[in-house]
Image (cartoon, rainbow, N blue to C red):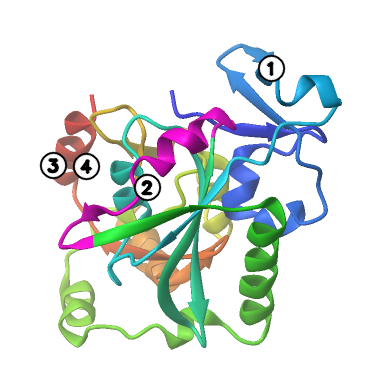
């Protein structure tokens, strides 16, 4: 199962993606959950316990990322580690090639640092230790930038893609791309709140490791609803803009079977 971190006030990892602005003032204590239970990761003995301090916030900073990098690429780069959140850094609404990656627990930071100067595609990526304050400052900057306008309206759109979407036949199913890894079915229901959807109609695609791939399929009541829902194309869920594509039962079944 995909790991979701939890803070002491109960905010879970899902909120770090879709609602991460709410955690800016939260404390650094880190928890983990497993299906049907709740437990706290214990910090290793020294150097934390004997000074009565909480373990450091498990975040690293990446630099030199490809400009078409996605959360799935970061997850693959840190294969085997628990990714709680990925925050891409923008300046004037342009991706800088930097990102912050929050991990499952402090000990994983050391494993992440071993990836320093390893390649992602044709680029080598630098990995640095970071701090909770740096991550929160980056969140605040992204939120402030968002409040200055509607980011999805400034995202360039390929004419050929738009034409293909407009001419595609609707079957009542839409494919979503670019979802935060922490997004759950309830977040997608909220995204399409103008339509009547049940969680059973939402299918999150997993990769071969059983982790969210950033894609999902949504079954609407009919083709008219799915066509109307295309108005949400390139709108944001949390800090990510979501791309929507008309799909089919065959494409949905194929994508879901690959993750099994």
Residues under numbered marks 4 and 3 in contact, where contact means CB atoms less than 8 Å apart: yes
Q: Magenta segment: does it hold 89? A: no
> Of residues 102 and 246, which is closer to you in this image?
102
Name the residue at 61% across, 72% down: 142
Q: Residue pushed farthest right?
A: 52
Circle nearer the viewer, 1 or 3: 1
Q: Badges 1 and 2: C-beta atoms under 8 Å apart?
A: no
Considering only order in the chain, which callout, 1 or 4, is on the residue closer to the N terminus?
Answer: 1
Residue 166 screen position, x and y as percent: 23, 77
**Image quadrant occupied by the C terminus:** top left
Q: Position of residue 67 (x, y in %)?
A: 30, 72
Query: In the drawing, what numbered circle is on residue 218?
Result: 2
Q: Secondary structure at mark 3?
A: helix
N-terminal label among 1 and 2 = 1
The residue lying toward the viewer, choosing from 220 and 44, is 44
Q: Which mark is residue 42?
A: 1
| Quarter of the figure with the N terminus | top left
Residue at the spot of label 3: 250
Between marks 2 and 3, how big is the CA–CA gap? Answer: 13 Å
| 3D distance between C-alphas at marks 2 and 4 | 9 Å
Tell me residue 106's x, y (percent).
Answer: 59, 32
Q: Residue at x 51, y 29 (%)?
A: 3
Q: Earlier in the sequence, mark 2 or mark 3?
A: 2
First-in-chain label (1 vs 3): 1
- Determine which residue is flagged by label 4: 252
Residues drawn in magenta: 104-123
Closer to the camera, 226 or 92? 92
CA gap between label 4 and label 3 equals 5 Å
Task: Provide the secondary structure element on which disc 4 rests.
Answer: helix
């Amino acid at each position: 199962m995909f790991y979701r971190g939890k803070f002491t006030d109960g905010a879970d990892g899902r909120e770090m993606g879709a609602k991460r602005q709410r955690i800016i003032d939260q404390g650094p204590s880190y928890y983990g959950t497993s299906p049907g239970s709740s437990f706290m990761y214990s910090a290793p003995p020294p150097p934390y316990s004997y000074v009565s301090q909480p373990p450091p916030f498990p975040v690293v900073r990446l630099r030199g990322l490809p400009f078409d990098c996605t959360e799935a690429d970061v997850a693959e780069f840190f294969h085997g580690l628990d990714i709680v959140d990925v925050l891409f850094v923008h300046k004037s609404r342009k991706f800088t090639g930097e990102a912050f990656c929050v991990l499952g627990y402090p000990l994983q930071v050391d494993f992440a640092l071993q990836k320093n100067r390893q390649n992602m595609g044709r680029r080598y990526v630098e990995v640095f230790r970071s701090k909770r304050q740096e991550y929160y400052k980056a969140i605040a900057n992204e939120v402030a930038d968002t409040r200055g306008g509607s980011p999805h309206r400034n995202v360039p759109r390929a004419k050929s893609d738009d034409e293909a979407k407009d001419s595609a036949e609707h079957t009542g199913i839409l494919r979503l791309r670019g979802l935060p890894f922490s997004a759950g079915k309830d977040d997608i229901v909220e995204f399409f709140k103008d339509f009547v959807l049940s969680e059973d109609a939402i299918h999150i695609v997993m990769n071969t490791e059983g982790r969210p791939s950033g894609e999902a399929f949504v079954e609407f009541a009919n083709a008219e609803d799915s066509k109307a829902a295309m108005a949400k194309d390139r709108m944001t869920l949390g800090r990510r803009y979501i791309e929507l594509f008309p799909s089919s039962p065959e494409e949905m079944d194929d994508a879901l079977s690959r993750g099994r």
